[in-house]
Image (cartoon, rainbow, N blue to C red):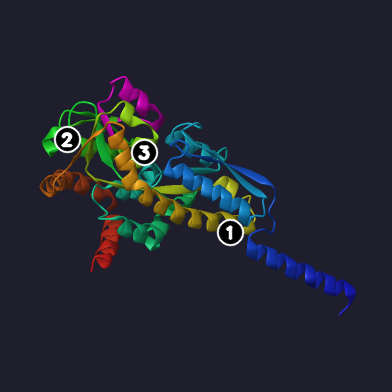
């Protein structure tokens, strides 16, 4: 073997080794990561962890700048910008992606998941990955799932201890059809609203209440404009970390590998951190002056009955996806 040939072989081996570590072909790049919740919220903490992992895995060549608090616009605006390649990453309620692929509506079905363990098995397994793969033709790469967690209802008018207490309230909902319909099914008045507008809407009494996990209520200081919190756990929200396909296609395999691995690690970190903090978040809301009520098992059953026609209505359009999810859940519950 000539000296030239040996050098060529060594160079090729070095390239393979670097590729395995995710640092091959990496250029100095800075990515924009948009999310709606403020600094210190578990989603922002997860995004910061993701940025840390990306930097470490790329040897500092890839950087992620996180823009929390809706500073780059609403969820809808962020998704549009991501498809156009002007925002790189977005973290948002997976159900919002139903505007891109209707099957994602299944994540907004009330009482679909009994607990966090079930949710993890679904989103990390074939079902969750299959749904993310359907986004590709829409110019979106689904990388991983984090979470907001289980949602609860707040309002400024009265304590909620029964299903009937909800009737008549004007509630902000995530802007999609199933959320509008389940609020109507409870006799309340749904008001679709982009998240950055919610605090102002509550403060100005344009809406009576909203529904979100403890972490969101606390981090966004809704306790300043909401007196009553009902622990209903009526809906579980996985959050999708999505990436611009337009940008993705400009990356080398090593760079893509870095982002995929960092997203997988950060998602598990974020979910655990969110769950570890939940009990403390509820206590903090009580200390901030919120009056907390809990729905009894009988009232939870009444909620489920109210929601059933809504689930049946929306499930009909994505029947195969609903059946697939229910089959996976049935396996987990054996």
> Is residue 195 or residue 130 the one in the foreground?
195
The image quadrant that residue 174 belongs to is top left
Q: SS of the residue at dot 1?
A: helix
Looking at the image, is mark 3 or mark 1 earlier in the sequence? 3
Image position of 141 (left or right of 172): right
Residue 280: horizontal and vertical position, in percent? 34, 44
Residue 122: horizontal and vertical position, in percent? 35, 59
Disc 3 and disc 1 in contact, CB within 8 angstroms: no
Labels 2, 1: front one? 2
Residue 81: horizontal and vertical position, in percent? 52, 37
Magenta stretch contains residue 140: no
Q: Which residue is mark 3?
A: 216
**Residue at horizontal 34%, vertical 50%?**
103
The disc label shown at residue 257, or none: 1
Image position of 101 (left or right of 161): right
Q: Which residue is mark 2?
A: 160
| Quadrant containing the N terminus in the rendered view | bottom right
The image quadrant that residue 166 belongs to is top left
> Is residue 179 or residue 220 the one in the foreground?
220
> Is residue 99 or residue 260 the one in the foreground?
260
Boundaries of the magenta span? 192-211
Magenta stretch contains residue 197: yes
Q: Is 82 above or below relative to 132?
A: above
Image position of 199 (left or right of 267): left
Looking at the image, is mark 3 or mark 2 earlier in the sequence? 2
- Name the residue at the top extreme: 204
């Amino acid at each position: 073997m000539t000296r030239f040939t040996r050098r060529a072989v060594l160079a090729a081996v070095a390239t393979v080794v670097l590729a395995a570590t995710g640092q091959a072909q990496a250029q100095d790049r800075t990515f924009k990561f948009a999310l709606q919740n403020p600094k210190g919220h578990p989603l922002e903490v997860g995004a910061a962890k993701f940025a840390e992992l990306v930097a470490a895995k790329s040897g500092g060549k890839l950087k992620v700048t996180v823009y929390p608090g809706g500073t780059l616009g609403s969820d809808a605006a962020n998704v549009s910008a991501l498809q156009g390649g002007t925002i790189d990453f977005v973290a948002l309620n997976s159900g919002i992606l139903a505007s891109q692929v209707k099957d994602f509506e299944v994540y907004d079905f009330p009482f679909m998941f009994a607990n966090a363990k079930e949710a993890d098995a679904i989103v990390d397994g074939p079902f969750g990955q299959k749904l993310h793969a359907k986004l590709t033709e829409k110019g979106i790469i689904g990388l991983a799932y984090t979470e907001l967690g289980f949602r609860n209802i707040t309002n400024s008018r009265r304590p909620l201890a029964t299903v009937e207490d909800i009737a008549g309230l004007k509630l902000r909902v995530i802007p999609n059809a199933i959320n509008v319909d389940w609020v109507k099914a409870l006799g309340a008045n749904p008001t679709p609203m982009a998240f950055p507008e919610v605090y102002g809407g509550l403060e100005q009494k344009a809406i009576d209440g909203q529904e979100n996990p403890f972490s969101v209520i606390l981090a966004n200081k809704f306790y300043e404009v909401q007196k009553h919190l009902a622990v209903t756990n009526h809906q579980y929200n996985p959050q999708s970390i999505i990436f611009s396909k337009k940008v993705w296609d400009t990356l080398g395999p090593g760079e893509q590998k870095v982002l995929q691995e960092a997203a997988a690690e950060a998602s598990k970190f974020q979910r655990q951190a969110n769950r570890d903090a939940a009990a403390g978040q509820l206590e903090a809301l009580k200390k901030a002056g919120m009056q907390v009520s809990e729905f009894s098992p009988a009232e939870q059953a009444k909620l489920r009955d109210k929601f059933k026609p809504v689930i049946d209505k929306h499930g009909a359009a994505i029947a195969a996806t609903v059946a697939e999810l229910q089959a996976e859940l049935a396996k987990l519950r054996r």
